[in-house]
Structure formats: C-alpha cells, structure tokens
Image (cartoon, rainbow, N blue to C red):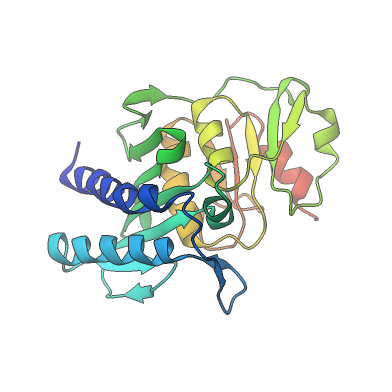
Amino acid sequence: MSPDLALALRLAEAADAISVPSFRTGLAIETKPDLTPVTEADRAVEAELRRILARERPDDAILGEEQGAAGSGARRWILDPIDGTRNYARGIPTWATLIALEENAGIRLGVVSAPALSRRWWAERGGGAFANGEPISVSAISAIEEAVLSFAIENDVPDIARRAWHVRGFGDFWAHMLVAEGAVDGAIDAVGVSEWDLAAIQVIVEEAGGRFSDRTGASRIDEGSAVTSNGHLHHELITAVADR
C-alpha cells in the first residue's frame, strides 16, 4: 500500500468519525444555488479532509463538492464528502464519502467509504480492488438476458432493460460498487454527475476488471455521465443510451 493510499484510508476514517454520529439525528437539509442538497455534515466532513490534506500534502490541489477548487499542480485530491445526501438526510443508509487522487490527469487511487452499510472499497492503479480488505472482481456475465442491470431513476430507462434478467435502480455510488463486486453486471448513472461523484468509482471499477466510461464510451470523469460494466456488456449499454 502506497503512502497516498494509506492517507486516503485515514481520510475515510476521519470522514466516518464526523458523518456517522450525525446520521439519523434530524439534520436540516438546505438547497444550494445549483439545486443540489447539502447538510452541516457535508460541510464538516469536507472541511476536515481539507484540513488534513493541508497538513499532510500541502502542495497538492483539491477539488471538493462543497468548497470547490483550490491549488494547482500535477496532483489533485477529489472529494465528495457525502455522496447520497438525500439518503443521508432521510436516514437511508446508502451514502458514502468518496476520495480520489488524480495525478497527471489520471485517477491513481480511490476510496469509497459507506459506514452505514459497513462497507469500504478502495483501489490503486496496478494493485487491484478491495472491499473491506478482500479482493473483488467484476462478473463474467456476457449476455444481457442473464444480466443484472442498474439504471438511475432519473433516466428514461432504455429498451435494453426489458431484455435483462433483473433490473433495479441502486443509485449513486452503490450501483457502481456492486458492479465492481460482481453482484451487478452493468450500471448507467444519471446525467449531470460531477467529477467528485465519479473519480473514485472509475479506478475501483477498472481495477476490479471492469470498464468505466461516459455515455459516448470515453474513459473520462468530466463529461457528466457514467456507465460501468463488467466489460463484456459495455458496448451494448453504450449503444442503448447513445441517442437518448
């Protein structure tokens, strides 16, 4: 484990120490100017992660959902303090802190910590992907008719869903982590997702042997869409949403 991955896991611990005690305590939810929700916990988690990074990696840039961009250079930490804020605010346990390190324009490592689910996923380029310390890998399903697929509820679900063996909308980070674990074979996220929603997910899915792309098939996190799969089904998924 590299020092950067060890730091990312310590950042996840620090985030959990703030988010868990506030979960299901009736936190007020506000609406930001971009119409996305935020709670005091979102802001507190990001502030603590930035404080730690300022001490441990003072030369690195940071991009966070709540405080935006700071610094410049070849290395950038990308933070989503609470992915799934609506779930968090309503007491639904599917939320997580997402932490990634981008270096020379590529995502080098990622951590997804979902303490209310008792799950933490991580990966580093060339080192494989893990959930709670155990190696994970995508499925080997190669036919849509045998596949479990996940579509964000905001999507107009494509016709391919009717051919799948099972379809569910798991939402947010969770659908993609289920792809990485091999429980789900492909997932299409809502349009409008941001870099902090996708950076950690990209490296974890790819290190688990899967494929991550935007809706055009490009492996990028800044286009506002995301499709993940076990690789075998990716072309069909991309084709199904290409014109939507």
Position of 137 with respect to 125 (left or right) is: right
Q: What residue sits 39% from the left and 73% below the top?
A: 67
Q: Whole-percent x and y of residue 101?
A: 31, 54
Closest to the observer: 21 or 194? 21
Q: Residue at x 64, y 20 (%)?
A: 141
Q: Is residue 105 visible?
A: no
Image position of 237 (left or right of 140): right
Q: Nearer the viewer, residue 25 or 197?
A: 25
Compare residues 133 and 164 and report the one nearer the observer: 133
Q: Can residue 15 be seen in this view?
A: yes
Residue drawn at x 37%, y 23% is: 135
Q: Is residue 174 or residue 37 the one in the foreground?
A: 37
Residue 119: name its quadrant: top left
Give the side of residue 49 with respect to residue 219, left or right.
left
Q: Position of residue 124 (x, y in %)?
A: 31, 40
x, y percent for residue 147 = 70, 24
